[in-house]
Image (cartoon, helix red, strand yellow):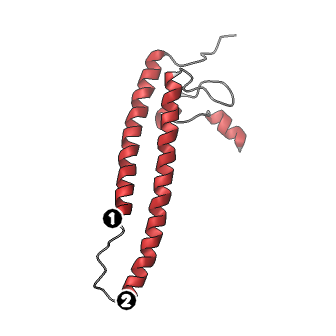
Amino acid sequence: MIDEITRYSDADLAEFKEIIQAKIKKAQEDLDLIKSAYMNDLNNGTDDTSPTFKAFEEGSETMSKEANSQLAIRQEKFIRDLKNALFRVENKTYGICKVTGKLISKERLKIVPHATMSIEAKNLQK
């Protein structure tokens, strides 16, 4: 029986580290945009319009704030997951499925760099 590779090489890990760092940078920029949009939602310039329109506007403003808040929460979780992946790169446990102990495919990690399970393990969960 051929021994399976139990971890990615340092060169592979360096490549994944670059991918993750770029995703963190982009995700942080997106989060900043979401937060600034949230702050700008506070004044939509409807002060001089009819009261009926203002009531509708306030309702949609509340929905918009809730949607932005949810987006911000999801984005913060994504950044946290990416930072955890970076930590796994540093301690050389990156890319190892937490269920099977096998390596997660490079293709999957390039698309979902914060993945902690292989497709095989994900399918077992269904």
Question: What number is the disc on residue 7?
Answer: none
**Residue 48 placement (x, y as % from top left):** 28, 85
Q: Quadrant of the C terminus?
A: top right
Crowd tier of the residue under label 1, counting other residues whose Cα lies within 10 Å: few below 14, some 14–19, many 20 or above? few
Element at label 1: helix
> Residue at the spot x=44%, y=66% of the render?
65
Q: Amino acid at mark 1?
A: Asn
Residue 23 to residue 75: above or below: above
Q: Which residue is nearer to you in this view: 83 or 22? A: 83
> Residue at the spot x=53%, y=21% of the render?
91
- Report the side of 106 relative to 101 (left or right): left
Residue 109 to residue 12: above or below: below
Q: Is residue 54 visible?
A: yes
Question: What number is the disc on residue 40?
Answer: 1
**Residue 102 placement (x, y as % from top left):** 64, 24
Q: Mark 2 vs mark 1: which is more N-terminal? A: 1
Question: What number is the disc on residue 51?
Answer: 2
Element at label 2: helix
Q: CA distance from mark 2 to mark 1?
A: 21 Å
**Residue 52 placement (x, y as % from top left):** 39, 89
Q: Amino acid at mark 2?
A: Pro
Name the image quarter holding residue 51: bottom left
**Residue 115 placement (x, y as % from top left):** 56, 36
